[in-house]
Every structure is written in C-alpha cells, then in structure tokens.
Amino acid sequence: MGSLQLQSVRKSFGPVDVLKGIDLDVEDGEFVIFVGPSGCGKSTLLRIIAGLEDTTSGSIRIDGAEVSAVPPARRGIAMVFQSYALYPHLTVKDNMGLGLKQAGTAKAVIEERVRKASAMLSLEKYLDRRPAELSGGQRQRVAIGRAIVREPKLFLFDEPLSNLDAALRVHMRLEIARLHRELKATMIYVTHDQVEAMTLADKIVVLDGGVIQQVGSPMELYNRPANLFVAGFIGSPA
Ligand code: ADP
Ligand code: MG
C-alpha cells in the first residue's frame, strides 16, 4: 500500500507562490519522476509530501487518509537526499538503524532489517565502517539502506545521484530500478537527468511555474509533448 493523492496543493514563502495548485494521483507501486527547472519547487513538493514542510492550502492523502496533520514519522514515508545526510561519527550499521532505534524498535528487529537491506545493497562488508571510509556511491547506498529498513510505503528521492560521477550514476540507476522491483514500493524521484527520467519512470510529472505542465509515461511525453517546455526537456541533451 502506498498510493498518494494531492489536491490543489499550494505553497507560498512570504509573497512568493512556489506551488500554485498541484493535483496528482500516484498509484500504489508506481515509479513517478518529477522534473523541472531549478527553483520550480520540486524539493518543496517532496518535503510537503514527507511532512517536513506545511502546505499553504490543499489536501494530501496517503492510501486515502488525509495526512496534512500527521507528523513525518507517522506517514510511512522515507526520504533520500542528494547530500546523503549521514552521521559521520556512526558506523554504517548504526546510521542505517538509528531511525528505528529512535522509534523504539527492538534490537533484534533492527539487526535483521539492517542485515537484509545491506544484502540488497551489497554493503555487508562495510557495516562497521564510518561514512568517511566509504566512496560516494557506498554512502548513497547507506542512505538508501537507512530508508529501506524503515519499510516505508512511499520512498522519496531528491536528486539522489547528482553527486556521483557518470559511470556510477548509471550503475546506481540500475540498482534503484532493481530495488523498485524487489520492494514493490511506491517511489517518487526528482532528477535533472533525462536518461534517469526516461528509463526509471512509469510516469513523469513536468513542473514549471508552480504548476504541472504535463503528466504522462515517458513515451507519451516523448511522442506528444504538451508544449515547448516539455519538448525541450525531452529533446535537449543532458
Ligand atoms: P527545486 O527543488 O525545484 O530546485 P525548491 O523547492 O528548492 O526548488 O525551491 C522552490 C522555490 O522556493 C525557490 O525559489 C526557493 O528559493 C524557494 N524556497 C524553498 N524553500 C524556502 C524557504 N524555506 N524559505 C523561502 N523560500 C524557499
Ligand atoms: Mg531541489
């Protein structure tokens, strides 16, 4: 279970209207990609879904239930950031398990989930290392592992591969596609990268000017872009 409905979601920072009425349906298990120019509100929209930011108005439902007043930890969501946001003084194992520990999860359950997630992410050999002793790709895997152990209904990724070099980006993109198949979870993923968008997405959401310009499958956007902005995104080289 992990469907999401946004209705007339608006967000202003002071006089600036960043999101001007977002309506979106995400089905359980879908892989949805948000694209749009820098500053158009992609991260703000993810933060609103996660509960890290309030809406100015509008409704957010997860599996049919309104969550606007539900705190982030109770939304069944886990978010992965571009910057990894790992604790430098904690080992890989403890970084991955910290959220569960803080939520009062039993130690044996934490250990089992960390073991499973680290196997999925080929991190078994690194569990006792600290983030400084890992490569960029391994750090991002730890950040993804920390999300997986929480067993969320909904994963939110904010440009998770932007800090990695091109070869590693391709590798991690394939890993994320595999995780989506294995976990069968709903994933919402922000990227600047056309190849990521075209290959990962069931559905691409193009944002600009505070509104959704178009929603469709990669082929629909490619074959029938709604306007020049969408055509430019699909057509221009990365
Ligand atoms: P994107 O992720 O698409 O690049 P963001 O969601 O980060 O865009 O930002 C959208 C707009 O909202 C930008 O103009 C940004 O400056 C503004 N913004 C984001 N967060 C805040 C905040 N906490 N206070 C004021 N303005 C903000
Ligand atoms: Mg952003």
Image: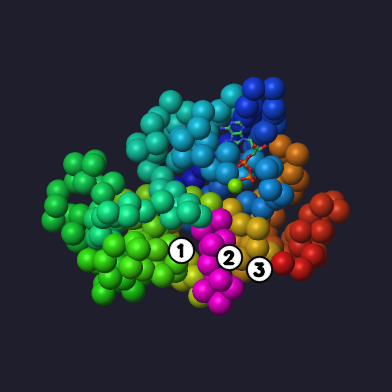
Q: Residue at x 19, y 41 (%)?
A: 104
The type of residue carrying mark 1 is: His
Q: Earlier in the sequence, mark 1 or mark 2?
A: 1
Q: Mark 2 or mark 3, which is nearer the start of the sequence?
A: 3
* Segment colored magenta: 159-169
The structure residue drawn at horizontal position 67% and vertical position 53%, both measured from the top left corner, is 35
Q: Secondary structure at mark 3?
A: helix
Q: Say whether residue 33 is magenta.
A: no
* Three-letter code, disc 3: Val
162 within the magenta span: yes
- Residue holding disc 3: 195
Q: Kindly state the secondary structure of the residue where label 1 is placed.
A: helix
Work out whether 218 lies above or below 95.
below
| Residue identified by numbered label 1 | 180
Q: Which numbered disc, 1 or 3, marks the residue that appears first in the sequence?
A: 1
User: Against 194, is 227 above or below?
Assistant: above
Q: Which mark is residue 200?
A: 2
Mark 2 Cα shell of 10 Å, populated few (<14), some (14-19), many (≥20): many
Label 1 or label 3, whichever lies nearer to me, is 3
- The C terminus is located in which quarter? bottom right
Q: Mark 3 touching mark 2, by CB under 8 A?
A: no
**So how many labels did they put on this image?**
3
Horizontal placement of 225 versus 54: left or right? right
Q: Quadrant of ligand 1?
A: top right
Residue 31 locus on image (x, y percent):
54, 58
**Does residue 227 appear in this view?**
yes
Amino acid, disc 2: Leu
Kind of element beneath mark 2: helix
Q: Which residue sits at x=34%, y=61%?
A: 131
